[in-house]
Amino acid sequence: MKSFTVACCLLPLVHFSFAEKWYKGNTHVHTKLCGHADSTPEVVAQWYHDHGYNFLILSEHNKYIDPSTVKLDGEIRDDFLLVPGEEVTGPVHSTAMNVSRLVPWEFKDKNRSKVVQWQVNETKKAGGITILNHPNAPIIRPAELYPVKDLYLFELYNAHPMTKNFGDAHRPSTSSLWNALLDKGMTIYGVASDDSHKFAKWDEKYDNPGRGWVMVRSNDLSSDAITLAMNRGDFYSSSGVILKKVMVANSRIEVEIDEEETARELTSQFLFGRPVKKGKPGTFIEFIGPGGEVEETVSGIKANREAKEDYLRCMITHRVKKSDGSLREYYAWTQPVFTDGR
Ligand SMILES: [Zn+2]
Ligand SMILES: [Zn+2]
């Protein structure tokens, strides 16, 4: 997919300017260098380049891959960028985004609040920002994150099959973790990523690429601009649904689904969606407020709502009946709007 500019009339944005564009990116992927993935940094970067992404972080476990050492083949699009990074891998994992060097990972402590804080601080010293990764594998409880300062991003949706985004008998969903953090007054945004390790073997059960990504609004495709935009929540996350209009400002959220672009994403042979047992096919927009309460559900492709108190966020579900009769769900998640003007 090439990057696309959304017409100005569709974009009553918080930080609107005529140069702003949406950039599709993945912040989390692995290469052979970690010892348990199957492809070189070049092959991995080439896949994302060839599949229309605009940016990628080669977030290797405790290894810094200098983007200038990764050479792509063929005609290289000028709207493709490798953002430097690493997956800081200790008792807790986090993506160190846009760092200029290796971030150390040795700090271990029984208190995981201290571990996360240490990763945030060390990443900052290396010039970057932290995305807390797959908080349901291992399970991180909300109270462990309450004391952490300067953490603005976490993986709401990690497409690796083992990461339990939607919870199970032993853990609540990452969505309820998010609600708990927002209820506590934290400013924290939800990221979707691939965390893929396999590019040589393909199946729904493998951690292949192309299943979770972010759409970042920025006036420039540079590592600094993309990182700053994500850190201020100027993006939405997707596992298949593309939005044509996203307004998250002035205590109000307004969204409209881009049906054409969503249908195009769903033709991907790499995207399977989340299997569900029941429900009618269709598109549903849910507005979620304090306590995780679904304040309103709208059937259809557009909706808007004003936040009553504290915060409001929005989740869009596109449910499809496949030719084999199974039901699959694809999502988009906006960032929260805060009534205190944050
Ligand atoms: Zn990890
Ligand atoms: Zn990973």
Image: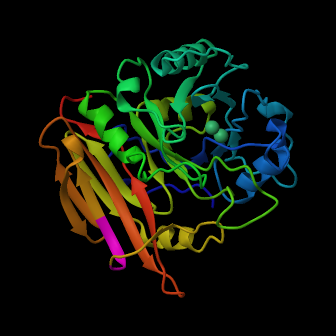
Q: Nearer the viewer, residue 207 or 265?
A: 207
Q: Quadrant of the C terminus?
A: top left
Q: Is residue 233 above or below residue 122?
A: below
Q: From the viewer's perspective, is 224 left or right of 289?
A: right
Residue sitting at 79 percent across and 29 percent down?
66
Q: Is residue 7 above or below residue 153?
A: below
Residue 165 forms part of the magenta stretch: no
Q: Residue 307 appears at what percent x and percent y?
A: 16, 44
Q: From the viewer's perspective, is 297 left or right of 143?
A: left
Q: Is residue 110 above or below residue 228?
A: above
Residue sitting at 68 percent across and 50 percent down?
196
Q: Specify whether residue 7 is in view.
A: no
Q: Residue 18 appears at what percent x and percent y?
A: 43, 45
Magenta segment's dominant SS is strand
Residue 283 forms part of the magenta stretch: yes
Q: Residue 175 appears at what percent x and percent y?
A: 37, 46
Q: From the viewer's perspective, is 152 left or right of 130?
A: left
Residue sitting at 74 percent across and 58 percent down?
50
Q: Nearer the viewer, residue 180 or 213?
A: 180
- Point out the residue furthest to the left here: 308
Residue sitting at 83 percent across and 37 percent down?
33
- Point out the residue furthest to the front here: 169
Q: From the viewer's perspective, is 258 left or right of 59?
A: left
Q: Quadrant of the N terminus?
A: bottom right
Q: Quadrant of residue 128?
A: top right
Q: Residue 312 appears at what percent x and percent y?
A: 23, 44
Tell me where the magenta segment starts and ends, as one range.
280-284
Ligand 1 is found in which quarter of the picture? top right
Q: Quadrant of residue 302?
A: bottom left
